[in-house]
Image: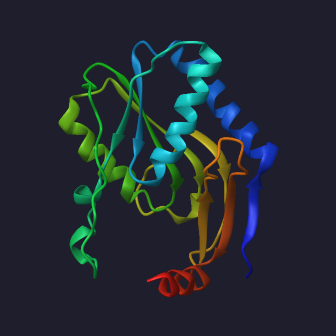
Amino acid sequence: MQDRVILEGKKFKFTIDRLCHQLIENHGDFSHSCLIGVQPRGVLFAKHIHKKLLKILDISTIRYGKLDVTFYRDDFRTRDKPLVASETEMNFLVDGQKVILIDDVLYSGRTIRAALDALQHYGRPDKVELLSLVDRRFNRHLPIQSDYIGITVDAVDEAYVAVNWAEKSNGNHKIFLHQKKARDERLETRE
């Protein structure tokens, strides 16, 4: 299977806009809510959501953090290579807040389970919701689901979903679907 683009251009932008408006419907001005991007790839998506919400609401701040889950994962000891943790940037507590965890692709649910464990170090939220750009709904290992979904992708285990965030603000963001074997071969040639 060749790489296939499943979302890009205007549809990608409309998806981000729709998700932001859904969040506004449920969280208003975000005075009792916060956004937390799950490191590393969820932070790239969270940054776009955060920036767009500030623009739509015409406000200067929404509590926004970046949460690393590396050592909360249930598989971190089974890796062949040492893991490199990302930085956690949370300058607020989540006690009594509505937390919106943000990740790019919801696959097995293990990353989100790890994020829920890591989040406990910052207090006890009133509610936790999940925002995913891509939901691979048939591949779940744990009973975790998104509250807000950009797109749903039904793909077999051999397929891989990747989000390509263009570096420039006017760049063309894309979501790809490709075979894991092809992805693994590309990663091996980079090492």
Write down the quadrant of residue 18 in the picture: top right
Q: Which residue is more in the foreground, 184 or 159?
A: 184
**On screen, 81 above or below 163?**
below
Q: Residue furthest right?
A: 10
Q: Which residue is more in the foreground, 41 or 155?
A: 41
Q: Which residue is more in the foreground, 39 or 172?
A: 172
Q: Which residue is more in the foreground, 25 or 8?
A: 8
Q: How many numbered marks appear?
A: 0
Write down the quadrant of residue 62 in the picture: top left
Quadrant of the frame with the C terminus: bottom left
**Colouring style:** rainbow
Across and down, in percent, residue 163 comes to 60, 58
What residue do we see at 45% from left, 17% from top?
61
**On screen, 14 above or below 74?**
above
Asked if one can make out residue 55 in the rendered structure from this viewpoint, the answer is yes
Is 29 positioned to the left or the right of 52 in the image? left
